[in-house]
Image: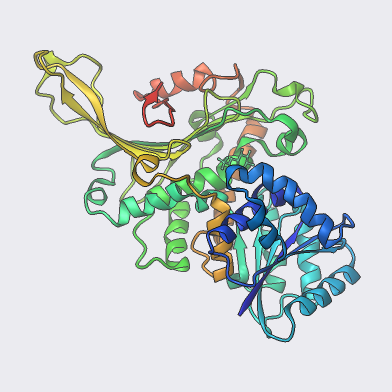
Amino acid sequence: MSYTLVIFGASGDLTSRKLIPALYGLFRKRRLPEGTRIVGFARTPYSDDQWRGKLTDSTREFAGAEFDSASWQQFAQSIHYQPGDIGHREDFVALKKRLDELEGSADASRVYYLATAPQFYEPAIEQFGATGLADESHGTRRIVIEKPFGTDLATAKRLNEEVHKVFSEQQVYRIDHYLGKETVQNVMVLRFANTIFEPIWNRNYIDHVQITVAEEVTVGRRGEYYDKAGVLRDMFQNHLLQLLMITAMEAPVRYKADAVRDEKVKVLHAIRVPTPEEVCRDTVRAQYRGYRETPDVAAGSQTATFAVVKLSVENWRWQGVPFYLRSGKAMSCLTTQIVIQFREPPHMLFPSGRRFEQEGNRLVIQVQPAEGIQLHFQTKVPDAGMQLRLTDLDFSFQREFHGTMPEAYQRLLLDAMAGDASLFARADEVEAAWGIIDPIHAAWRTTGKPQMLEYEPGLWGPQAAIDWMGAQGRSWFDACPVIDGSHSS
Ligand code: BG6
């Protein structure tokens, strides 16, 4: 069986920055099934050769040191282009004819990748249905849908309904590229392939969990999209909730798409949907100074570029353990980390030896960029009485495995081709995630609380977020990872 990957939105940024470099990377590692064809579809009237030329330049730029002309020339032979407009039925008919010609008489598996702007998802899906492109009598037909999947619960439901008119759920692969990251998958391995963590991974030992996705970049040229989305839609509904689900889920009975996703969805169902009063108490929102001067951002914009959301997972394992989710643009540094803060010892033997305020054990999972895990624990400082200090066991993927981490899209593209949906969001999962985010947006809008704050770019958000955490007797673990494995605050 051969494979055809059809990319809709072929002339866009995602295609040139992520998808083609990822496919080329797979080709270089000989992971792309032999004979795989890549067909681009977009309105720009390129020929095959023109599109290949354009991709040669962009891949040289985005694949960096991995690019080499000889292997690229070989790979480029499998790239084709079919001009067309998603609004025109006849262009889909022409695409179908072209795909049939490229594939010849043998059956082929197809993956349709919607890398277009989101407003084209529904029209494209309707065209697949009308032109028989979803029909599986000559091989599997799968559809990959990029984020954002809807902008709230109502639009996500509607999109799911439209998708399901044409494709069965088994054919649908909703992307959250965080699930393609090695370190995110490794959280499952850490928890479920080891025996020492799981017994303490619960309310008896854990005080709270912090999940931070901090970015140094500003909104930059994405003002038009971002001002409508804001940090909750852009980062929380998808990436942060995915990290929370993987941290909080029960062990699936087997590593199979539905078993994994069933457990993840249960976590979302266990999250207490906050009332407007709780939203006021349990969230912080802020904008970085200068955001409103960004091109295409409204002058009086009330869009948050930073937020903290405290969520409760109400089940036996997590009752009373707050999950603090935090994300923002224009912050101190680029870091995605999950911090498991353990409780303090019930009785401290060494009161006089304390140098710092008592700190419990902490497991820090560095998702990126200094991928690794540190376990923090108290140690006796030599030759200093009974003075203690928090030190750490430090595991680094880079030191252990050398080589660079593969791009998340490599894994996701291969899985979609192979029909493994474990690392993709299911229909009920995206809807349940919106069901948590919508009430927060609604409360912010209707009550105007908590107040929108401002923060200086280059910090860990507004001071109020630090004070807010302090008022709960806790503090953020704010460390900027340093790629050589050491850490600085
Ligand atoms: C995207 C968001 O989904 O994820 C961006 O739209 C964000 O705003 C990006 O910068 C972060 O992804 P990563 O892989 O760089 O952490």
Query: What residue lies at 82% left-to-right and 74% top-to-bottom?
Result: 98
**Which quarter of the figure has residue 125?**
bottom right
Q: Left or right: 325 with respect to 150?
A: left
Q: Residue furthest front?
A: 70
**Which quarter of the figure has residue 431?**
bottom right
The x and y percentages for residue 440 are 58, 39
- Residue 111 visible? The answer is yes
Q: Considering depth in this image, is 445 or 399 the residue closer to the camera?
A: 399
Q: In which quarter of the image is the N terminus?
A: bottom right
Q: Quadrant of the C terminus?
A: top left
The x and y percentages for residue 60 are 68, 45
- Residue 13 visible? The answer is no
The x and y percentages for residue 80 are 77, 64
Query: What residue lies at 25% left-to-right and 25% top-to-bottom?
Result: 359
Total marks in image: 0
Query: What residue lies at 9% left-to-right and 13% top-to-bottom?
Result: 385
Query: What residue lies at 72% left-to-right and 64% top-to-bottom?
Result: 77
Q: In this view, does 228 lie above or below 50?
A: above
Q: Is residue 318 above or below residue 286?
A: below
Q: Considering depth in this image, is 142 or 227 the residue closer to the camera?
A: 142
Give the quadrant of ligand 1: top right
According to the image, what is the colour scheme of the structure?
A: rainbow
**Which quarter of the figure has residue 222?**
top right
Q: Left or right: 339 with respect to 64?
A: left
Q: Considering depth in this image, is 353 or 380 the residue closer to the camera?
A: 380
The x and y percentages for residue 364 are 35, 36
Q: Considering depth in this image, is 59 or 433 the residue closer to the camera?
A: 59
